[in-house]
Image (spheres, helix red, strand yellow):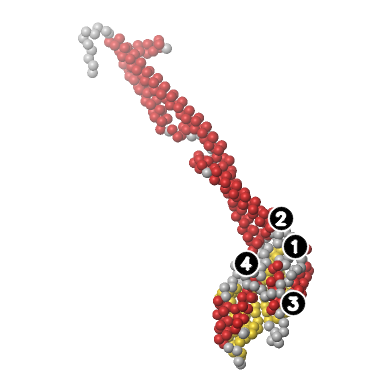
């Protein structure tokens, strides 16, 4: 190595062009090394970037880690809320009948009318409607009786084990002071298909079947008091 | 340009060789120094990179379970909101005595005027079924008879003052003999739509 070095010095000493070549080669090498160092120093982030792709951005990871306790609390809160809601859903669908039986419904309405001193002139089933919440079976009921009896009937109707809505009422008075002619439009809910109640029953429990219908034990004889309804 | 010393008896070729040796030595020193510096920078970068990778790995290992918790919490929150709405929807479908309350409200409003009621019709708003607009409307119609026109007007005002009704109108006010027939129309209000 040393001999080659001396040989190169000897050649360069004899020929000025070779010395010029040494200047060019040496200068170029130094410039190249300086440029490489400068380039490396100018790109610190790139050289420090991870070799494998990250599952998430670093900023997001830092934000998550700093809020770790918050998300843990939130998860616990939502889990507790979910358990409460599932219990609530179990209770909420208890009242919704899974099936509908027209004969039993008619018997329940007639029974209630009799206990409220109303005469049933006729009961006629109507059309079936599929709502978003429940499926509805409509019925038209013709009754005769006093205003007080009618109020008792309407008061007891939503308290029956089988849920029944009254949606429309027509009262025709008798000029001879006779009984009132009453036509009631009733709506009997059922879980049905593709309704919210059917979905909740499928997910969270089974409601009471229709045979659970029980008569009202203590018919109220007082006039209706305003404010019973929540709405 | 540097001139040669007149007492210097050393041949020119020796001078040139010495110059070439110095030049070569200088370039070698410079190149070796720069190479060592470059090597040091590379090692430093590599070390930084290893440290950075290690800290990133720790950060990711800590962040991934938190992200899973977050996703689960958000999913549960969404599911809870939906479930809550469904429960509320089913609970609002539970039967109430809305018809009785509206009937009682009309009777209480007009009972003091001594009217003779001939006909009463009340229909509450029901959930709109696709293609059926008839069942969705609410209405109240009361047909009364009275001997005095002002009584019918008072009855109209009494129903208009009732919170359960709005848009109260007297659509038919006819007098046949001594008896005035009045038809009072109003729209029942309801917070809960019947299913």
Answer yes or no: are tags 3 and 1 on the same subunit: yes
Nearer the observer: mark 2 or 1; the answer is 2
Tell which subunit mark 2 falls on.
A
- State the image quarter where residue A33 is shown: top left
Of the pair B121 and A20, the residue shown nearer to us: B121
Distance from the alpha carbon under mark 3 to that under mark 2 = 37 Å
Between discs 3 and 2, the one toward the N terminus: 3
Asked if labels 4 and 3 touch by Cβ distance under 8 angstroms, the answer is no
* Residue A197 can be seen, yes or no: yes
Residue assigned mark 3: A118
Picture quarter with the N terminus of chain B: top left
Between discs 3 and 1, the one toward the N terminus: 1
Q: Residues within 10 Å of mark 4 (few under 14, many from 20)?
A: few
Residue assigned mark 1: A99
Q: Residues within 10 Å of mark 3 (few under 14, many from 20)?
A: many
Tell which subunit mark 1 falls on.
A
- Give the percent coordinates (x, y) of residue A134: 68, 63
Of the pair A162 and B61, the residue shown nearer to us: A162
Check the image and report above or below for A81 versus B139: above
Asked if labels 2 and 3 touch by Cβ distance under 8 angstroms, the answer is no
Distance from the alpha carbon under mark 3 to that under mark 4 = 27 Å
Tell which subunit mark 4 falls on.
A
Residue assigned mark 2: A205
The extreme top residue here reads B9
Residue drawn at (64%, 75%) of the image: B103
Please tell me the numbered disc located at residue A230.
Answer: 4
Nearer the observer: mark 4 or 2; the answer is 4
Of the pair B48 and B162, the residue shown nearer to us: B162
The extreme bottom residue here reads B177
Between discs 4 and 2, the one toward the N terminus: 2
Between discs 3 and 4, the one toward the N terminus: 3
């Amino acid at each position: 190595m040393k001999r080659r070095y001396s040989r190169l010095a000897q050649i360069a000493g004899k020929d000025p062009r070779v010395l010029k070549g040494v200047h060019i080669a040496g200068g170029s090498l130094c410039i190249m090394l300086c440029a490489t160092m400068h380039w490396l120093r100018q790109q610190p982030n790139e050289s420090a970037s991870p070799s494998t792709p990250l599952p998430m951005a670093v900023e997001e990871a830092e934000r998550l880690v700093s809020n770790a306790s918050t998300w843990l609390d939130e998860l616990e809160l939502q889990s507790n809320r979910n358990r409460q809601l599932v219990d609530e859903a179990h209770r909420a669908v208890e009242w919704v009948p899974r099936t509908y039986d027209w004969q039993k419904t008619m018997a329940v309405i007639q029974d209630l009318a009799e206990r409220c001193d109303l005469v049933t002139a006729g009961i006629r089933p109507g059309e079936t409607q599929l709502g978003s919440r429940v499926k509805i079976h409509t019925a038209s009921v013709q009754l005769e009786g006093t205003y007080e009896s009618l109020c008792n009937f309407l008061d007891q109707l939503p308290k029956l084990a089988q849920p029944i809505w009254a949606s429309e009422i027509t009262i025709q008075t008798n000029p001879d002071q006779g009984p009132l002619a009453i036509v009631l439009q009733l709506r009997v809910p059922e879980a049905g298909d593709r309704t919210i109640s059917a979905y909740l029953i499928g997910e969270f429990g089974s409601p009471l079947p229709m045979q659970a219908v029980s008569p009202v034990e203590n018919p109220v004889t007082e006039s209706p008091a305003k404010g019973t309804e929540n709405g | 340009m540097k001139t040669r010393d007149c007492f210097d008896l050393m041949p020119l070729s020796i001078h040139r060789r010495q110059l070439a040796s110095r030049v070569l030595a200088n370039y070698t020193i410079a190149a070796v120094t720069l190479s060592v510096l470059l090597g040091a920078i590379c090692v430093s970068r590599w070390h930084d990179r290893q440290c950075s990778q290690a800290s990133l790995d720790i950060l990711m290992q800590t962040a991934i379970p938190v992200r899973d918790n977050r996703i689960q919490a958000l999913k549960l929150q969404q599911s809870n909101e939906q479930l809550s709405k469904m429960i509320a929807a089913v609970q609002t479908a539970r039967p109430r005595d809305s018809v009785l309350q509206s009937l009682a409200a009309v009777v209480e409003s007009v009972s003091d005027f001594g009217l003779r009621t001939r006909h009463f019709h009340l229909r509450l708003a029901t959930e709109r079924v696709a293609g059926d607009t008839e069942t969705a409307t609410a209405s109240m119609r009361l047909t009364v008879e009275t001997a005095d026109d002002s009584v019918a007007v008072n009855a109209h005002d009494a129903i208009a003052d009732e919170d359960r009704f709005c848009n109260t109108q007297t659509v038919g006010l006819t007098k046949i003999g001594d008896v005035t027939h009045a038809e009072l129309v109003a729209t029942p209000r309801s917070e809960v739509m019947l299913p």
